[in-house]
Image: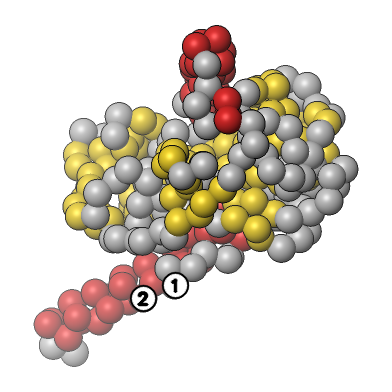
Amino acid sequence: MPRFLVVALLVCLSSFAQADSYITRLLNKPVPGGVAVIDLGNASQAPKATYDGKRVLVVNEQGTWRAIVGIPLTAKPGQAQLSVAGRAISFDVGSKKYPEQRITLKNTRQVNPNPADIKRIDGELAEQLRAYRSFSAGTPSNLLLDKPVSGPLSSKFGVRRFFNGEERNPHSGLDFAVPAGTPIKTPANGKVILVGDYFFNGNTVFVDHGQGFISMFCHMSKIDVKVGQDLVRGAVVGRVGSTGRATGPHMHWNVSLNDARVDPAIFINAFQP
């Protein structure tokens, strides 16, 4: 066989292997608020990868290391870079337009908090950001996640939100329309790293699935776990409620990778471009 045909065949096989990667097909949605899956090769040990200065989840799939990179909603479409062992790997971030949602709240303090509220909010935000930025060594038990509750979606990720006509932060998770008291189950093994009752989020639980892959559940009526508790997939973390800034009972679920809140729909095979 001529040499150029051999080279062409190897290139085709390499491209096919990348395209046939289960993790890539499942998770690679490289848009703001999405996920980029990047091939890191087949080194004997897991490469250390960072994006925007933050450690990135790295997993091994059939002998190939892959970085699972969370892209923040604030990212601009265009070229981005992953840093791996002193070298830069470029990847493209596409574009995605998110819809708008207008919500009316009777409690105007949850739209324009007073000075005492703001002091509380600032302290709570710092506490939650520390949890989002934690990085443990364990590999997640599963990347295809279970839904924490069984029920229809009531609000999608990334929606631009207007409270009483004033724009606030985009919706950072998925909302499920389920009755108060419904058990909320962890979608993968993990450790409870934070619980609290917060001004906006109400009763809240953070579960670390490993390497900066974190689930957050909020607005709960009851918390059933404690900080430091190890959980197996399907364990109950709490019950659905409407605490904090909520207009009624629902389950709000955030997923974070490398301190970037990303669309949980990606991990339950429900992502819509």
Furthest residue in direction bottom, as rendered? 1
- Secondary structure of the residue carrying tag 1 is loop
Q: Mark 2 to mark 1: distance in Å?
A: 6 Å
Q: Are marks 2 and 1 in contact (CB under 8 Å)?
A: yes
Percent x, y for residue 227? 72, 20
x then y, percent, for residue 263: 50, 52
Whether residue 42 is situated above or below residue 254 in the rendered picture:
below
At 50% from the left edge and 26% from the top edge, which residue is drawn? 112
The mark found on residue 32 in the picture is none
Between residue 258 and residue 47, name the one nearer to us. Answer: 258
What residue did someone put label 2 on? 16
Three-letter residue code for mark 1: Asp
175 versus 5 height, above or below: above
Q: Position of residue 86 (x, y in %)?
A: 21, 33
Left or right: 217 in relation to 127:
right
Q: Which residue is mark 1?
A: 20
- Dot 2 lies on which element? helix
In the displayed structure image, the side of residue 76 where residue 187 appears, left or right: right
